[in-house]
């Protein structure tokens, strides 16, 4: 619930509110991490590269990265 509340706060900010947006994102994801949009599913054993923006489902056992995030390769 806290994560959803933070997403609401983030969505209410403007592009000019850099400091507030950064604060909310750090609270959501820590110093690094990936941005995962609501409704996107990440399969088990999937690895997402830091800084990725995940806009669609990532299958099980895949390494995905980028902006937008895409599957790079399968993980053995």
Image (cartoon, rainbow, N blue to C red):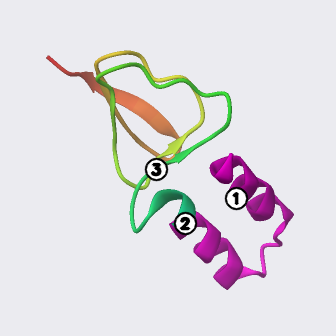
Which residue bears the numbered disc 1? 6
From the top left corner, tell me how far across and down residue 58 is, in percent.
45, 23
Magenta includes 22? Answer: yes
**Residue 16 as seen in the image, left or right of residue 70:** right
Q: Are marks 2 and 1 in contact (CB under 8 Å)?
A: yes
Earlier along the polypeptide chain: callout 2 or callout 1?
Answer: 1
Q: Secondary structure at mark 3?
A: loop
Question: Which quadrant of the rendered structure holds the C terminus?
Answer: top left
What's the CA distance linking mark 3 and mark 1?
15 Å
Earlier along the polypeptide chain: callout 2 or callout 3?
Answer: 2
Q: Secondary structure at mark 1?
A: helix
Q: Are marks 3 and 1 in contact (CB under 8 Å)?
A: no
Which residue bears the numbered disc 2? 27
In front: 64, or 43?
43
Q: Secondary structure at mark 2?
A: helix
Q: What residue span does the magenta drawing correspond to?
A: 1-26
**Residue 45 as seen in the image, left or right of residue 71:** left
Which residue bears the numbered disc 3? 34
In front: 4, or 33?
4
Mark 1: few, some, or many residues within 10 Å (few <14, many ≥20)?
some
Q: Which residue sits at x=71%, y=47%?
A: 4
Q: Are marks 2 and 3 in contact (CB under 8 Å)?
A: no
From the top left corner, tell me how far across and down residue 39 is, in percent.
67, 28
């Amino acid at each position: 619930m806290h994560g959803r509340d933070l997403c609401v706060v983030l969505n209410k900010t403007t592009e000019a509110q850099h400091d507030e947006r950064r604060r909310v994102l750090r609270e959501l994801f820590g110093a690094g991490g990936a941005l995962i949009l609501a409704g996107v599913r990440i399969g088990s054993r999937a690895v997402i590269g830091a800084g990725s923006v995940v806009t669609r489902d990532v299958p099980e056992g895949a390494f995905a990265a980028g902006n937008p995030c895409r599957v790079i390769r399968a993980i053995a």
